[in-house]
Amino acid sequence: MKIYTNMKKNYILTLLLTLFISGLSFGQGAEPFTNVAATNSYADGSFVGEGGVTWTYVSSRQASGNFSSQVTTLNLPALMLRRIASDSKITSSTISGGIGDFSVKLYKGFTGGGNRQVELFINGVSKGSSEAFDDYDEHIFTVSGINISGDVIIELKNKTSKQVIVDDITWTAPSSDPSITIGSAISGLDYFEGSGPSTEGSFSIDGINLTEDVLVTAPTNFEVSLTSGGTFTDSVVLIQTGGTVASTSVYVRLKASLGVNTYSGVITVTSLGVNNQTLALSGEITAADPQITVTAFLDDFNYLGSVGGPSSEDSFTVEGLFLTTDIVATAPTNYEISLATGTGFGSSVNITPSLGTIPSTTIYVRLKGGLSAGSYTGDITISSTGVTDETITVNGIVYGVPTNSMVITGVYDGSLSGGTPKGVEIYVLKDIADLTLFGVSSVSNGGGSTAGNIEFSFPAGSATAGTFIYVATEATNFNVFFGISPTHTSGSMGINGDDAIELYESGQIIDVYGDVDNDFSNEAYDYLDGWAYRKPNTGPEGTTFNSANWNYSGVGGLGGGTNNATATTPFPIGTYENTSLSVNRNSIKGFATYPNPVTNNTFTITSNSSSKKEFAVFNLLGKKVLSSSFSGIKKDIDVSSINAGMYILKVTEEGKTATKKLVIR
């Protein structure tokens, strides 16, 4: 039996093949779907077609108008099969006279991407599948050499999740020549050394118009049987009755007691007057060395230090073959493992094999309780004699009490291509030594809090109080629109005007923009193609959003121009202030700077002490642009090398720090 799927690419070729297939159909039957009764809705139904054959369809619809205009060779009416999950198919009533060859035209239904493919069954037995396609050409799926006499039932099933159109089914009468049909190649006839024979594979044989019995001969190192689990030999004979061998299963396996190697060969099926049929076999014998299999997909093990731990459990599995000693799983420092959930945790577990085998066994792991705030990582080791150790890396964090050192100060949904720039502005309220403790997540369309699922965690580094941090989806349009580059880029900030933002520190939400349970419809804080900006001296506010603490552009506020300056309502980038906090941070006695704003490229730093002072000037993205030191109570600082703009001044004296916003004009 041969299977073909022929793709038609021009009208002339389509016409020639259609005429050819029509000529063949005169030998037996055809179904052009002229009488199909399906509607524009998916349903079950039936219709009487050519030659009085009744065709029954499941979860199908008529194809009219439900395909791309690029499908130019389809002649309606036709039938569309919906999808495999709906068991979409079309089945004939009993057809007398048998079947030789089969053909059907296939087309792509609708325009959605994805493969289309059908499978042919004759009397409930699969005879092959069409080639998968995802284009608008005509495909002719042909199966030749089926050659089944007597009564037959034809069935076509959709075997994908996408719609496929079927049209012009044709079939011929079975050939009068002797014919044998066999299954396809069999692989995976494997076993471990000393554990043979292999498990069985099987294939089917059927024949018609035969004049002699069918001989099935196995290749060297393989053996066959007509009974699963029965006696296997080098060959078997299938007795023909009235010239026919009904579909019969033949079982095959790789022989026992073979050495470590890869084996292959070809089964030969013969009968007088029939070309020899062959079927490829392959198998492998693997050395029976001790082996361990570990399956692990572990989440991070985190908990709040204020709660005390331990963390929630996660688990992995181990199994082994041909073992001579126990499997020993050992937890790294600060972690513990157990063979039972909720109890029995310790530094290691032992699993004893039975006859060298350990079936799949679950091991539970968690981060120990009572640890101090910090990150914890290590490797679980799984070992047994004669086996290379397996390791599983585990990571966890014990979160300390939040410092509330950041606050969300702005969100923006731009008007450039793709709705860019999109993202969030964050202000650093206090110096941060470890930025990895912080992160942000977005909440789409009122979907509820992200509840610990941090979508973007800040990379390692530090941040200075007074610094602005910008997280955007991309850098190019952000720079075009605002004239600066974002601090970080992350796809998680692909927000629209109806999405909330949650700011995390140490695994806990410390600030939020928007009601996470609301899609912002008809709300003042909807920032579609616009922005929202926090009012001075407000925030952070934990998990509670207070809309009164924000100013809004209104929907479309960032439209009307090609950058922020030309927008209908420009985003007030980098203007948030928290004066109460800045006063508290000025712990240097007598600290002052003047003039501020700086108008002549020079400003003065003073304090009550003549001790050494170290100072640094940062731009709003946290980049240091100037630094030096001096001793004395006063020093004039030259800033002529710095562009006009807003900056953060940080001064340190005798371990005390003062920060101040500095404006240079």
Image (cartoon, rainbow, N blue to C red):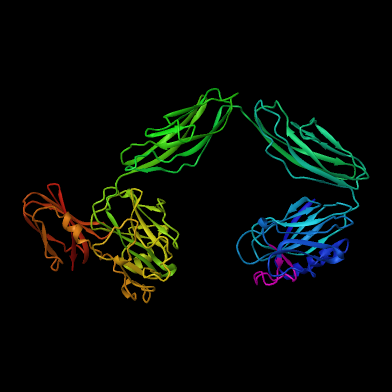
| Residue 643 in sight | no
x, y percent for residue 198: 70, 32
Which corner quadrant of the image does residue 539 belong to?
bottom left
- Position of residue 10 relative to residue 652, above or below, is below
Task: Give the residue displayed 73% in from the left and 30% down from the top.
Answer: 255
Report the side of 88 relative to 495 (left or right): right
Report the side of 123 relative to 296 (left or right): right
Report the side of 660 relative to 526 (left or right): left
Task: Give the residue displayed 40% in from the left and 58% down from the top.
Answer: 442
| Residue 35 in sight | yes
- Position of residue 149 relative to residue 484, above or below, is above
Q: Which residues are magenta?
A: 61-81
Magenta span: predominant SS is: loop
Number of marks:
0
Q: Is residue 78 magenta?
A: yes
x, y percent for residue 120: 76, 55
Q: Is residue 552 magenta?
A: no
Which corner quadrant of the image does residue 582 belong to?
bottom left
Report the side of 57 relative to 114 (left or right): right
